Amino acid sequence: MKALGLITISLCCIGAPLGAQDTTHARHPAQRPRVGMMGQRGEHGEMDDMMPMMREMMAPMMRAMAYNPEHLLSRKDSLKLTPDQITRLTAIQTSAKSAHDAAAADMKAHMAALSVAFQAASPDSNALRMHFDAVHAAMGKAHWAMLSASAQARAALTDAQRQRVDAWVNAMEQREGHEHTM
């Protein structure tokens, strides 16, 4: 039970970007939900119900995350990035990764402390709240590092390169929209 709370919070916080990409439920709507422990639907219980909500919340971020420096660098040939752009994007990526990793480490430490605090026979709600707030603040810093890097990376591209990335996002959104209507 100790790990269950930590896992649930971690999955909700960290898994949201992955949930935005998961289309397996949309492709297989006829599957019947399985009943698991305590009568919860699906293999993951309430997590199954949260995935569409996470997808909906994360959808506006998809366009911004398409400009993630790592994503752009992996498509350097099709974007025809110049050596200067590659250098700039690599520097942005390195800086963002450092900031993201520091925030993730802080989040992990507070998640562990939150789990320990919850194990008391009568958990101190003030201690829980402090660690809960710290987890969210660290998560915000991690997300901001990635969003800021994407904004800087977008600015490093030419208009033609931005149009190409936007076309990729538009095509992906159309595909996903089509899958959700099936």
Image (cartoon, grey):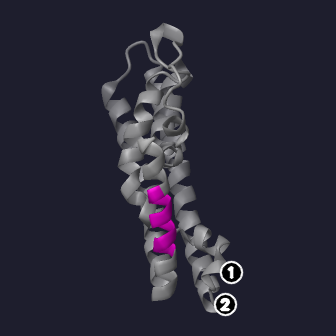
Q: In this picture, which residue range is highlighted in magenta?
A: 165-174
Q: In the image, which disc is placed on residue 175? A: none
Q: Residue at x 52, y 49 (%)?
A: 21
Farthest residue to the top: give it: 38
Which residue is depicted at the point 46% across and 41% down? 182
Q: Dividing the picture into quarters, in which one does residue 117 lie? A: top left
State how far apart marks 1 and 2 are (Cα): 11 Å
Q: Are marks 1 and 2 in contact (CB under 8 Å)?
A: no
Mark with earlier residue (1, 2): 1
Task: Find disc 2 in the rendering and name its residue.
Answer: 83
Direction from residue 174 to residue 24 in the image, left or right: right
Disc 1 residue type (three-letter): Asp
Q: Residues within 10 Å of mark 2 (few under 14, many from 20)?
A: few
Q: Is residue 173 magenta?
A: yes
Residue 17 colored in magenta in the image:
no
Report which residue position mark 1 lands on: 77
- Could you tell me which secondary element the residue under label 1 belongs to? helix
Q: Is residue 145 visible?
A: no
User: Which amino acid, by three-letter code, is at mark 2?
Assistant: Pro
Q: Which residue is painted at 35% across and 24% down in the image?
A: 124
In this orientation, which residue lies closer to the viewer: 20 or 142? 20
Q: Give the class, few, some or many, for how many residues have Cα within 10 Å of label 1's Cα (few <14, many ≥20).
A: few
In front of the other: 123 or 64: 64
Residue 4 x %, y %: 52, 23
